[in-house]
Image (cartoon, rainbow, N blue to C red):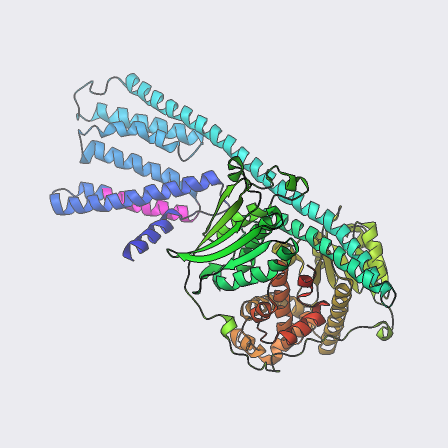
Amino acid sequence: MFYKKIAKLYNNLTNIGVTDKLSKLERKRVRLLNIFISNWFLIELVLISEDIFNKGTSSLPVFIHSGSIIGLVVTLFLQFKHKFQAARILFFSLILYSNFMFCNFAERGGYIEYFYIVVPVFLLLFTNNKYLLYSVFIISYLLFVIPIHIFPIYPKGTFGSPILILVQFIIFFFLVQYFKNVNTKSEEILENQRKQLEELNEFQSQFFINVSHEIRTPLTLIKGEIDQLELLKGSAYEKEGFDIKNRLNKQVNKIKNIVDDVLDLAKMKEANFKISPTPYLINKLIDKLYTSFEPLCNQKEIVFTVKKEKNECWVSSDIIFLERALNNIILNAIKYTPKKGNITVSLNKLNEQIIISIKDSGIGIAKEDINLIYNRFYQVKNDINKAGGSGVGLAFSKEIIELHQGKLIVESELKKGSTFTIMLPQTSKINTKENLEEITVQHTYEESFTHKKVTSSEITKPYAILIVDDNFEMRAYLKKILNQYTCFEAENGKEALDVLSNERIDFMVTDYMMPVMDGLTLIEKIKEQEIYVPILMLTARTDSTSKLNVLRLGIDDYVNKPFEKEELLIRIQNALHNNANRAQFIERNNISKKELDQNNHWIIDIQKFVYKQCSNPKMTQDDIVAYFSTSRSSLNRKIKAKTGLTPNQFITEIKLQKARDLLEQNPTILLKTLALEVGYLHTTHFSKIYKQRFGVLPMAKNNQV
């Protein structure tokens, strides 16, 4: 423990003055100088102790060391104040001072003078300033030459003539400077290459995002056409239309899953990408995988077998990502295993490791391809892959497993099959939410999330909705869906701002990616110009950063493409209802714009608190009141003024938003698990309020297999 504290202290010392604003080279220089200061400081303390306890005859060395220590403390203070140039000048002045004193007074005759040659060379590590370098060069030379001719310390001619000494200085200095310049150029080349690779990686990520946008827009329009099959209800073709709709939905979801995998793979290369591991009983996941894939295996006449360890197997995992990784491997096994084949999933413990084995009797992989199958977009050349595939599934699975501190090993033989072995560190058991007793949900915290549905008969004058999308067909489709409202159109954010300045707009539906001005910039401009309008964003971007950038809890919303017609309508109706409540509350209570602006950060803090705590089924607004040291009336006033929701509705909204995020990350999550994650102990009640909020049941996507 003591050594850890010392190490931490030393680390803090070496990082004094270091900030992200400094260039990479400058950060190196600051840290290096801190290291030299720290080490020199320790050396000085040791030398002072020796001089005091061993010699005790002269106070000169102690005086020299004390002066150096004071100078080092000042240098470190200058580093802390970011006065780096001054710190370096003082540091090298201390070196010259210390060397001069020891050469001529404290340690005479020790040939320490040769250290002067090293000083200007040493300075090359810290600066490219020619004036400073040549000044120190000249001072060092003079401090070497002049004293040896003034003080009779050495016999005449010991160091040679002043010209010979100067030649030694020049050769050593310029030789080191030459190699430094070569090294600097090499580093610049490497840095440029690194930047080019980063730009290429950013280009690839943007390419994936653009492609997903291009794919999701026509997918949305396809789903719109699928919805027209509802017109066949009650006719002789109703059953046929229902079958067609299911088949089309199945293909739409397949395309969407491929896009999601590619996007996830791109996100995993971002520096801020993280998983959130928690202890999980992996036996349950194996059962779930069997339930999920048995029907597909039966359809392909493949024998699907599961062999499980009897004892509980716990791993620390982000179960959403781990499940998707295993799904990809099993789907691959099914894809490459012919009819009458077999697939076996095994779960075992071995040496504090949890071993998951997926063995198939498929076509196998050639030896030369085994080391390549984890590369992004790589596909083994065979008849099956000629028919399609993205080549991202195994790359995604491997990276996810490695993020779990695990290993993925493959053994395979052509025409005999493959075995994929996943090794994960075992962890200890915890009390899970599944062990909670079923208790009655208290009405005090579960205020029903029932927004009044706005119907056309209740609208005294039609709401005006602005549709912003660069795709003409998408705008036409949205206008058809929103025919009960007065609709305005804009092709991009710039046009939308013009419409907003000339028309009374009650609600805006906008795309994320558009030319001239995208959806995010449009929202920023609207906020800057203090135009208040509820906004719903239609986006093909599924990354959490993009969602957080556009989400305005309780008032603004986002919908991923492709979307359900009924889902979009209900979300718009809910938002209009919230906005009407908010406007009435502000007017009734005379709430000023200044007060609304002051509430912004406070509301965000509450949102974060509830988001973290919402798995607790007993959480109420009283927990918020206690945590933020406020009153119930103040809490109600601020939340209502900002969102149009009561505190209990606000809590419910955050729970449902989190449920939606979890469902989007893992569409195959069990309903019971999803409900417990957000603090609902009864799945029926959870499903009911989820549909009231989003227009679809939480498990609707799971049914579209």
Q: Residue at x 26, y 34 (%)?
A: 99
Q: Is residue 530 visible?
A: no
Q: Which quadrant of the rendered structure holds the N terminus?
A: bottom left
Quadrant of the rendered image containing residue 511: bottom right
Q: Nearer the viewer, residue 91 or 703?
A: 703
Instruction: Give how far across and how far down residue 607 sits, in percent.
Output: 59, 67
Q: Nearer the viewer, residue 242 or 38?
A: 242
Q: Nearer the viewer, residue 206 or 283?
A: 283
158 relative to 138 in the view: left or right = left
Instruction: Give how far across and how far down residue 209 sits, in percent.
Output: 67, 47
Q: Main secondary structure of the magenta part?
A: helix
Q: Residue at x 57, y 56 (%)?
A: 304
168 relative to 383 in the view: left or right = left
Q: Is residue 81 visible?
A: yes
Q: Residue at x 70, y 60 (%)?
A: 704
Q: Is residue 208 above or below residue 538?
A: above
Task: Give the number of callouts.
Answer: 0
Q: Which residues are magenta?
A: 65-82
